[in-house]
Image: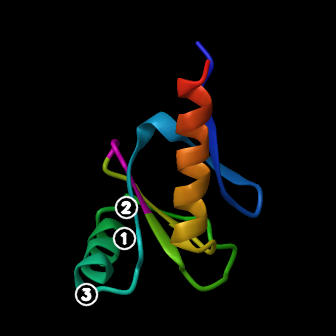
Amino acid sequence: MEKKLLNIGFGNTVVAERVVSIVSPNSSPMKRLKDEARNERHLVDATQGRRTRAIIIMDSNHIVLSAIQFETISQRFEDLKTESDGR
């Protein structure tokens, strides 16, 4: 079984089928979610020291931070889904 990897920027990938949601980090609930994940040690920072532009929520309760715009990651995710459906 082949797993599709979603490029989240700067050489980092996540398994696409494990992604629950891709959201903007700007709202208060998302900031709270990020802080809670950090406290529970479920936060993965893949920003390479850059500003967080997307939050990726995984089915494992991990929160992944990315420096790539959430619109860009969402489009990449949709492209992977379309590619899989076309097979």
- The residue at the point 52 percent across, 58 percent down is 74
Q: Nearer the viewer, residue 38 or 74?
A: 74
Q: What is the CA distance from the residue labelled 1 to the residue labelled 2?
A: 5 Å
Comes first in the chain, label 3 or label 2:
3
Q: Nearer the viewer, residue 48 or 56?
A: 56
Instruction: Establish if 77 lies above or below 73.
Output: above
Circle 1: residue type = Arg
Q: Magenta stretch mostly in which secondary structure?
A: strand
- Give left or right: position of 17 versus 12: left
Residue at the front extreme?
86
Residue ID for mark 2: 41
Frontmost of labels 3 and 2 is 3
Q: Residues within 10 Å of mark 2 (few under 14, many from 20)?
A: few
- The residue at the point 62 percent across, 75 percent down is 67
Residue 28 marker:
3
Residue 40, quarter of the rendered image? bottom left
The x and y percentages for residue 44 are 50, 61
Q: Are marks 1 and 2 in contact (CB under 8 Å)?
A: yes
User: Which quarter of the figure is the N terminus placed in?
Assistant: top right
Q: Are marks 3 and 1 in contact (CB under 8 Å)?
A: no
Q: Secondary structure at mark 2?
A: loop
Asked if residue 23 lies in the magenta stretch, the reply is no
The x and y percentages for residue 19 are 42, 46
Looking at the rendering, the stretch of residues picked out in magenta corresponds to 56-60
Circle 2: residue type = Arg
Instruction: Establish if 19 lies above or below 8.
Output: above
- Give left or right: position of 86 versus 61: right
